[in-house]
Amino acid sequence: MHIGDGIRSAMVSIASHKMRSFLTTIGIVIGVIAVVTMFSSVYALKNLINTNMERMGWNYSVIIAPSAASVNNANQRSAVKTKRRAAQNVNPVDLDDYYTLKNELNYKAIYGMVETNTLQRMGNEDNYITLKATENYFFTSKNYLLSQGRLFSPVETQEGLPVAILGYKYAQKYYPDREVLGETIVLGEHRFRIIGVLGSDQLNRSGGMNFNTWERDRELQAVYVPLKYG
């Protein structure tokens, strides 16, 4: 059979079975669209995850923490691990080690963090507040924006001056609908001048996905001071 005869035979068959041919064509089109949509969705989801992780600084992050022995709230299991490692004579990481790393390494962003819980008295009410001593890179790498004020100045960072940046949820709880810049906050035996307030968590508000919401919620309830002050 010649090619022309084969084509004519196929056309005649299609014409005589119009409904079957139509349904077959529809099935093929739907299948192709479904496959294209699936791959497009996977690609878009991958891009969304990568973008949000980059905004949080997770794509090229290295976290160095001190040994459990230097943490006040270390649990018993961590203490056992520390005893097992004591024979290795490895000292925990301290602030001097951090500054050495900071001076020696090439990096896009680096920050230290010292955290404690401190008592705050407001009127007749006592509350334990999370106090974090850190640097401006913490806010930029975690994608935290300011709703009021500013970040730490170079002088405040270098000298460890008593200034504070309030977390968004902390400010909403204790200073709702107030302009607090310039006010003094007393935490434990220390007094800090408020220079800034963080905004709400924009990372988990937009994009349709949640990233480490528990940790970020806790960070937005804290108060931040310069690392050297801590």
Image (cartoon, rainbow, N blue to C red):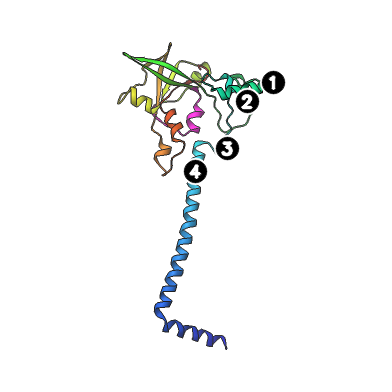
What residue sits 40% from the left and 17% below the top? 193
Q: Is residue 170 magenta?
A: no
* Disc 4 residue crowd, few under 14, some 14–19, many 20+, Cα 10 Å: some
Q: Amino acid at mark 4?
A: Thr
Q: Amino acid at mark 3?
A: Tyr
* Disc 3 residue crowd, few under 14, some 14–19, many 20+, Cα 10 Å: few
Which mark is on residue 51? 4
The tally of labels here is 4
Where disc 4 sits, the SS reads helix
Q: Where is residue 32 shown, x and y percent of the image?
A: 47, 65
* Residues tagged 4 and 1 counted as in contact (Cβ below 8 A): no
Where disc 1 sits, the SS reads loop
User: Badge 3 is on which residue?
Assistant: 60
Q: Where is residue 209 shown, x and y percent of the image?
A: 43, 43
Q: Where is residue 228 shown, x and y percent of the image?
A: 53, 18
Point out the tag, 4 or 3, that comes first from the N-terminus.
4
* Disc 2 residue crowd, few under 14, some 14–19, many 20+, Cα 10 Å: few
Left or right: 177 in relation to 31: left
Point out the tag, 2 or 1, that comes first from the N-terminus.
1
